[in-house]
Amino acid sequence: MVIAVFSSGVMLISAILSIIAGEKLDKGSKESMEKLGSWSISANWIGKATIQNPLAFSIFDLFHKLMVGFRDMPLTVIAYEHAHYGNQESYVVYRATMVRIGMILAILGFIITTYLGFSIWFTFILAAFFAILPSIIRR
């Protein structure tokens, strides 16, 4: 029962933060919001890699769920704005293809690091790097 109440609370807070993120997007601060989300998620992955405790891991996972909207919403809005000003169909297909290729490369990276004998925590550090990659590329 306690877990259900806790999970419901997390979902409620996440929904409220998504509404706040949407309002910030409407005001036009896409880039700063995307940076906040990317850097927060990156810090989250580093925290998961360094504090290897089940309770801390759960807290970091909660933080990740709360902040993912601040990263994903602006990226989606920016992508569709680009599509609006260009060839819409080809851009949407291109973006979807690149997202899938990114997912495949992430899974491949995990398999390679595991095969080479690196720990799962090293993979978390790689995830931290890939979380801030959109912010790095934007500069």
Image (cartoon, rainbow, N blue to C red):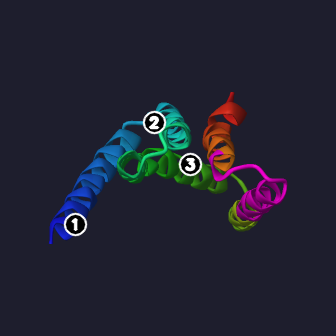
Total numbered labels placed on residues in the image = 3
Pointer 1 residue: 3
Query: Which residue matches tag 2?
Result: 33
Q: Amino acid at mark 1?
A: Ile
Q: If the image is split into quadrants, where does the N terminus sit?
A: bottom left
Which numbered disc, 1 or 2, marks the residue closer to the eye? Answer: 1
Q: Residue at x 44, y 33 (%)?
A: 29
- Mark 1 or 3 closer to N-term? 1
Question: At label 2, which amino acid type do we have?
Answer: Met
Instruction: Give residue 57's position: percent from left, percent from top.
Output: 42, 49
Mark 3 surroundings: few (<14), some (14-19) or many (≥20) residues within 10 A: some
Picture coordinates of residue 109, whole percent (x, y): 78, 56
Residue 11 location (% of width, % of height) = 27, 61
Relative placement, left or right, of 46 versus 61 is: right
Is residue 105 rendered magenta in the image? yes
| Left or right, residue 103 beside residue 80 | right
- Which residue is identified by label 3? 75
3 in relation to 16, above or below: below
Q: Which residues are magenta?
A: 101-121
Q: Which mark is residue 70?
A: none
- Tell whether label 3 touches label 2 (CB within 8 Å): no
Q: Main secondary structure of the magenta part?
A: helix
Front residue of 78 and 135: 135
- Judged from this view, the residue extending furthest toward the top is 139
Callout 3 amino acid: Leu
Decide: few, some or many residues near mark 1? Use Cα within 10 Å; few <14, some 14-19, many ≥20: few
